[in-house]
Amino acid sequence: MTQIRMIKISLVIVLMAFAPFIKAETVIVHPTLNDLHLTKTTLRAIFAMRIPQWPDGTPVNVFVLDDEHPLHMQFCKSLLGMFPYQLRRIWDQQAFSGTGVRPNRVSSEAEMRQRIANTPGAIGYISDAEIDATVTALGAPS
Amino acid sequence: MKALLWLIASGFVWPAFAETANTSNTRLHWNGFASQAFVHTSDNRFFGDSDNGSFDFTEIGLNGSYLLSPRLRLAGQVLSRRAGDLYSGSPQVDYALLDATLFSSAQSTFGMYLGRIKNPIGLYNETRDVAHTREGIFLPQAIYFDKVRNLTVSSDGLHLYGRLYRDSGTWSLQGGIGYPIVDKNFEYAYMGQDWDGKIRSNDLAAFGRLLYEHNGGRWIYAFTGASVRTDFRASGADTVAFPAGPGLNSGNIDIDYSVFSAQFNGEKWQFTTEVAFQAARYRNISAAFEAQDFNSIGYYSQLSYNFTSRWQGFVRYEEFQLNHDDWNASNRARQNREESAFLANFGIDRSPIPAHAYYSKIWAFGGHWDVTPQWRVRAEYQIVEGTATLSPRENDMSQTDKHWNLFALSLSYHF
């Protein structure tokens, strides 16, 4: 009995350990933006729509999925350490006071990848499995 | 041949045009909102004939933002706001500004806004008319007075801003000067009625807010300071000497306002508290007004819970005291009774305004459901003691009921 329980527990631990890799998401950018090393702090500022330009002068173009999209929720929590409603509140406060704009919304990961590949200065996120040569994947934020 | 040339030419032009359309797509942003509320009060009038049920609370807005260059942006919003007898709903320019980024890096951003700018006061003032950005159908009236909304909502001038992105959190500072926008509601709220003379704002007002978002906004703290001078120009019947008239002179009403804010944002629970201090000084208008200088305090604490990402409920307690040296206004009420008795000697009949007109204590319970990301339905119930949050424009303040409650429903859309 205790042995079965031990096996169950170790199975859960193993699954938990792998879960982040199974559904991992990565920040992707337009291919001309190479050599970027973004920290969590910078990523937060970018996705809060507070940084207008990349170091080379290109405008920052942020793309996101719907608030309730599982990948968006996971991206917010694991890479930004925020909840989707917090980003939504920042965007709405800026968009309705004239102090900023909302990010560009895409409806699927395929559209995300395509828009990022075709928009200079674009940044977004995608599941690891969806990454291809049309976009540049960034390492995990430090 | 001609057709071929056209074809070749359009072959060059079309992709270029498509390219422009594609980039202008990320340069131009449109947003809008519309909200309609139903308000029912047991007694007293709040946003129309609410004691019979009122639909006189409607907010509609449309805004645009256009990126001229990576560092220059134009933004503007037109707002139509109907709120009982206070606001008619005629469209107004809510803000219209040029946003210039002076410096930007991964560590910081500095810039300025020029034009009609929303004043950052507390956590909610800038977007106070956008239903989706509020916790309830109404903002806490103890701090965000709807009875004098226009005075603080935006001003025409220049603001500088700076943001520092640190690993521990983000620091934001915005401050500047501008001419506030005053209207008749100010006269009703600060001078009790609409006088023959006019209120103007010929002096620059100053606004500033320091805001710190710890750990991506898990905790938010803010301090706001504002200083406004308004000019009252007495005319006509105002200047007739007592006892035949009120005997008013031209003068000023100076207001200093400061707000302390704190907020916790958890996955399920959110807690917000804000406290505001206001010092109002009447200068030269009349001895009676100068005796009404006040130091008010308003505060609220609010606990919200996200049942799901679409269902949320909140409970809030708010309180406003017009004079914190005369808590619950018993001294003021006694003075009013003495004044009425004195005026009766001259045959002037004026009912004394009771103590409960100078404070408000409100318990609010409410919740919302996001039917879709665009549509939100809300319900709210308030148990109220006192009438300081009501406007003399909608109520005879000597005749209001001390204990009353409010029920409201609203439907809001935004894109």
Image (cartoon, rainbow, N blue to C red):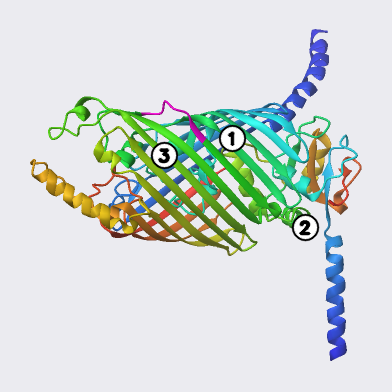
Mark sitting earlier along the chain (2/1): 2
**SS under mark 2:** helix
Residue B83 position, x and y percent, is 37, 42
Question: Is residue B377 depicted above or below B7 in this figure?
Answer: below
Badge number at residue B255: 3
Could you give the CA–CA distance between mark 2 and mark 1, rounded to whole angstroms?
30 Å
Is residue A105 at all visible to an observer of this figure? no
Is residue B307 at all visible to an observer of this figure? yes
Q: Pointer 2 and pointer 1: residues touching (CB < 8 Å)?
A: no
Residue B394 position, x and y percent, is 29, 44
Q: Which residue is more in the foreground, A93 or B220? A: B220
- Residue furthest top in the image: B2
Chain letter belonging to callout 2: A
Could you give the CA–CA distance between mark 2 and mark 3, rounded to whole angstroms?
46 Å
Chain letter belonging to callout 3: B
Residue at image x 34%, y 40%?
B86
On the image, numbered disc 2 is attached to which residue? A78
* Residue type (three-letter) at the residue carrying disc 1: Gly
Residue B100 position, x and y percent, is 66, 28
Residues in magenta, as a range: B200-206
Q: Which residue is more in the foreground, A30 or B98? A: B98
Question: Is residue B239 depicted above or below B289 in this figure?
Answer: above
Mark whose residue sits in front, 3 or 1: 3
Residue A128 position, x and y percent, is 86, 53
On the image, numbered disc 1 is attached to which residue? A98
**Which quarter of the image is occupied by the N terminus of chain A?**
bottom right
Q: Are marks 3 and 1 on the same chain?
A: no
